[in-house]
Image (spheres, rainbow, N blue to C red):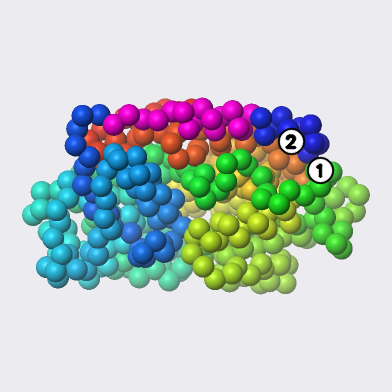
Amino acid sequence: MTEQRRSVLGAVVSRVLRQRRANVHPVDDAPAPRLGYVVLGAAGVHPGSAHIRVTRRVNREVVAGRMSAEQIDPSAVAAGEKGLPYDVVLVQRDAVPASASALFLQAVRASGARLVAEVDDDFFSVDARRRLVRAEYDEARIDSVEAVVRAADAVIVSTEALARVVRQFASEVVVVPNELDPEFWGGEPGPTSPREPWTGGRPDADGRVHALYMGSATHQDDLELLRPVFDGLATKDGRPVVLDVVGVTGGDPGWFERVDIPEGHHPEFVRWLRGESGRWSVGLAPLADDPFNTSKSDLKFLEYTMLGLPTVASRSTSYATVPDHGGRTASSTDDWRRAILAAVDEGPSEAAASYVSGHRLLGCSTTWADVLRRGRTARPSSPPAC
C-alpha cells in the first residue's frame, strides 16, 4: 500500500468513525431495564465470545444509562442463594452448568423475568454435536444449551444460517451480526506499529512472507485445508510464503509455524495481536464444508481487516459477502494459492476497512439492545451504517 493510498484510507475511516460517534441513540422515557446476564468467566475475565457477543455490548448500554446490569452466578441461583430481581435474564451459550440448568430455569420463570438466550455456534445439529464432543465438550453441557434455548422468550444468534437451525427449538430468533469494539481494536484498521509502505507483503529478515491463521480448538479440520496450499508456496519473485498459526490446538507443526500466545484474557490477546500485526501479510479463514461451519460468522474477516491485513476465506455461506467488501474467497488448493499471492501482492483493501468501520463496529446497530430492553424483533436486511 502506498503512502498516498494509506492516507486516503485513513481519511475514509476517520470520517466514518466521526459519523458513528455522532450517532448517539437517545434514551426514551421507559425506565432502564434491569439485566442479569450469565457468561463464562468472572470479574471481567471472559472468553473472547463472551466479550464480543455480550459483555462489551452490556458495558456500552450501562455507560450510556440505557440499562443496569449485573453478572449472575447460575449455580448460586439454582441453590437458592441468589435471587433474580431483574426485568430480563440473558444467558450466553453454555454458561449455565448442566447440573444447575433445570433449577436455574425454574428460578427464572418464577421471578417473572424475560429469558433471552445468546448463541453464536451450532450446538444442535447431529454433525455439529459430534464435532463439539471431539473438541472435548461434554454432551450434558451441550444439552444445557438446548434446554436454555427451548425455554427462552427470544434467542439472539450471529448469522441467518444459525437462525435456521435454532428456529427448530426456539419460538423467536433474532439475528445480530458480530461487531468489534473499537475500544479493543483501535479507532482505525491497521497495525499499531506501522511498517514500511506495502511493497508486495512484509517479508521477515530471512525474506519469508508470513500468513496468519487464528482459531479455537474446534478448527483443527479447517487448518488441515491449508496443508497442500503451503506446499512450496512462494511469491512471484521467489520468496517463501509460510503459515503462522495462533491457537487451533493439535495438528502436525511440521508444515506450519506455531506462534505462542502470552498469558492473559481476551482484551490482552487483542492488544498483543494488534502489536504483532506488522509481521503478517495476509489473514486466512479456512472453513471445512460441514454443518457446524455453515452457521459460522465472518468474524475473522472483521478482525483481519482491523489488523490491516487482506483476507482470504473459504468460499462458503459464512464468507459469501466477503468479495463484496474487498476480501477474497477460495475453494480449491489452486484457488487458495492464487488468492493468497494476489492478497500479498496488493495488500489491504480500502473497501474492507470502510465497510468494517462503517457497519461492523459497536454502535452500528441497536437490535441487540432492543431485544433486551423491549423485546423488539426488528431484523435489518443488512447491517445499518453507523
Where residue 381 appears, as percent x and y from the top left, is: 42, 27
Judged left or right of residue 366, residue 328 is: right
Label 2 with label 1: CB-CB less than 8 Å: yes
Question: In the rendered image, which quarter is residue 352 located in?
Answer: top right
Judged left or right of residue 342, residue 362 is: left
Figure check: 218 above or below 24: below
Where residue 166 appears, as percent x and y from the top left, is: 32, 46
Q: Which mark is residue 197?
A: 1
Where residue 62 appears, as percent x and y from the top left, is: 32, 45
Question: In the rendered image, which quarter is residue 241 located in?
Answer: bottom right
Q: Residue at x 61, y 50 (%)?
A: 285
Residue 252 in magenta stretch: no
Figure check: 238 above or below 103: above
Q: Mark 2 or mark 1: which comes first in sequence? A: 2
Judged left or right of residue 86, residue 219 is: right
Q: Amino acid at mark 2?
A: Arg
**Which of these two is toward me, 3 or 315?**
3
Q: Dot 2, crowdedness within 10 Å: few (<14), some or many (≥20)?
A: some
Q: Residue at x 46, y 68 (%)?
A: 135
Q: Residue at x 26, y 55 (%)?
A: 70
Which stretch did the figure color magenta? 12-27
Tag 2's secondary structure?
helix
Q: Dot 1, crowdedness within 10 Å: few (<14), some or many (≥20)?
A: some
Judged left or right of residue 176, residue 310 is: right
Q: Amino acid at mark 1?
A: Pro
Q: Which mark is residue 6?
A: 2
Figure check: 18 above or below 210: above
